[in-house]
Image (cartoon, rainbow, N blue to C red):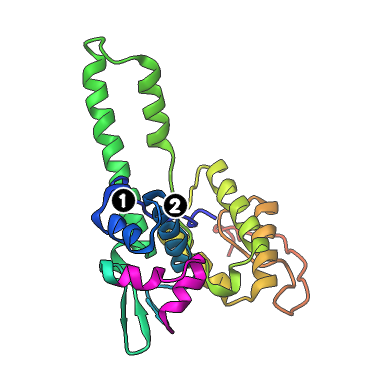
Amino acid sequence: MAGDWIKIEHALIDKPEVFQIADSLGLSDDAVVGLLVKFWCWVDRNLSAFCPTISGQLSQVDRVVSCTGFGQAMVDAGWLDNASGRIIIPNYELHLTQTAKQRALEAKRKRLRRAETSGLSQDKTGTKPGLEKRREEKIKKERVLVFEFPKNLDTEEFKSVWAKFDTHRKEIKKPLTATSANMALNKLNTLGHDLAVASVAYTIEKGWQGIRQPDGANGKPEQPKQEMKYRDPNRR
C-alpha cells in the first residue's frame, strides 16, 4: 500500500532525546533509533487523526517495542505524554497523519522541481550530465498518490484490484487525483466489500474511466441493451 510509510528525519540519529533515552536504558543510540521507528510504525497503523491517543499505561509502549521502561524514557525525553490514563503523541498531526505525509511529498516534489530548474540552467553551459538530467525528469513525472482506504475496504483483495484500477487509469491517460480517488473510495464503501471489488474489476474489464456496478448487481435483472433511435427533425 502506498500509504505504508512514516517520516524520519536525517537528524534523528543525532538528536539529544535519542542520547537521553539510550543513556537511561543502557542501550546504544542505534538500538534506540530502531525502537523509535518500530513504535512510530505501530502508532501509524493503530492511530488516526480522529483518535490520536492511546488508552492505557506506559507498559503498553514497552510491550510494543519489547523493551521495559521505553515508554517512561520517551516521556522523560518529551516524546510522549501520559495523563489521565491516556498516552498522547505530541505533534501527532504534524508528522503521522495522511495530511502530514502529503505535505512531505509535496515538499519533496518542490525540491525536485527546483533541482531540475537549476539543472536545466546548468545544462545550457554544458556542465550538467545528460544522464542525470533525464533521471531527474523521470522522477518529476512520477506521481505519488497516497490512498486512505475506508476500514471496510482496507483488505488485500480490495487494495490489489484498486492498484490495478490506478494502473488502468494511467494507461488510458486519465490518472486518478487525490480528490477523485477519495470520492470513488467513499462511494465504493457504501456498496460493501464484495460488490466494491466486483465493481472495480468490472470497470477495468470494460475499459471505462468511471466505476460502475456489474449488470444486475443491484438486485435487478440485467436489462437487454436497446438500440438508440433518432428522430428525423424534418419529419412531422
Residue at image location 36% in from the left, 15% down from the top: 130
For disc 1, the marked residue is 12
Using the rendered view, name the quadrant where residue 87 is placed. bottom left
Q: Secondary structure at mark 1?
A: helix
Vertical order, 87 against 200 (above or below): below
Image quadrant occupied by the N terminus: bottom right
Residue at image location 49% in from the left, 47% down from the top: 174
Vertical order, 133 against 86 (above or below): above
Vertical order, 46 against 160 (above or below): below
Q: Residue furthest bottom?
A: 84
Which circle, 2 or 1, is nearer the viewer?
1
Residue 141 pos. (x, y %): 41, 36
Whether residue 45 appears in this view of the structure is no
Q: Residues within 10 Å of mark 1 (few under 14, many from 20)?
A: few
Using the rendered view, name the quadrant where residue 53 is placed. bottom left
The reply to whether the magenta stretch includes residue 73 is: yes
Q: Amino acid at mark 2?
A: Leu
Q: Amino acid at mark 1?
A: Leu
Residue 35 pos. (x, y %): 44, 59
Task: Give the mark count.
Answer: 2
Tell whether 191 sits left or right of 178. Answer: right
**Measured Cα–Cα span from mark 2 to mark 1:** 26 Å
Residue 37 pos. (x, y %): 43, 57
Residue 69 pos. (x, y %): 41, 71
Q: Residue furthest top?
A: 126
Residues drawn in magenta: 56-75
For disc 2, the marked residue is 145
